[in-house]
Image (cartoon, rainbow, N blue to C red):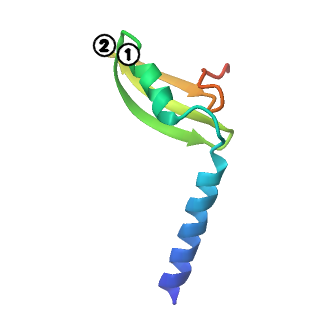
């Protein structure tokens, strides 16, 4: 019984997280745009923020770490 309850909770949690991401620019397009920048070595991490934007962490060829916030509707960086 506990397994069924846990599975139900996980299902609803996953569905509500999926529903929270708005329609707009595809994440793959956002990542491709970042990777096409000449100095980008690789994208390390992408997270969804509850405030409604993606947090993207990537590294430059120089080794510098860059963290940006991307609006999923426009695909553009969010001003802090």
- The percent position of residue 25, horizontal first and vertical second, equals 58, 31
Q: Is residue 52 above or below residue 65?
A: below
Question: Residue drawn at (59%, 27%), measured in percent from left and top?
Answer: 70
**Residue 51 image offset from top left, x and y in percent:** 69, 39
In which image quadrant can residue 78 be found?
top right
Q: Where is residue 54 in the image (x, y as percent from the top left)?
A: 57, 34
| Label 2 sits on residue | 61
Q: Are marks 2 and 1 in contact (CB under 8 Å)?
A: no
Q: How many marks overall?
A: 2
Residue depth check, mark 2 versus mark 1: number of the one nearer the observer = 2
* Picture residue at 50% right of the left edge, 24% below the top: 67
Q: Is mark 2 on a helix, strand or loop?
A: loop
Residue 2, compared with residue 79, is above or below; it is: below
Q: What element carries label 1?
A: loop
Residue 64: mark in rendering: 1
Report how far apart the C-alphas of labels 2 and 1 lie in the structure. Answer: 7 Å
Say if 68 sits above or below 51 in the image: above
Give the vertical position of 76 relative to 27 (above or below).
above
Q: In which quarter of the image is residue 64?
A: top left
């Amino acid at each position: 019984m506990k397994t069924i309850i846990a599975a139900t909770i996980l299902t609803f949690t996953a569905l509500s997280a999926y529903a929270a991401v708005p329609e707009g620019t595809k994440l793959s397009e956002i990542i491709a745009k970042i990777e096409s920048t000449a100095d980008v070595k690789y994208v390390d991490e992408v997270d969804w923020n509850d405030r409604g934007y993606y947090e993207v962490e990537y590294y430059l060829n120089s080794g510098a770490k860059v963290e940006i916030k991307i609006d999923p509707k426009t695909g553009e960086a969010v001003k802090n």
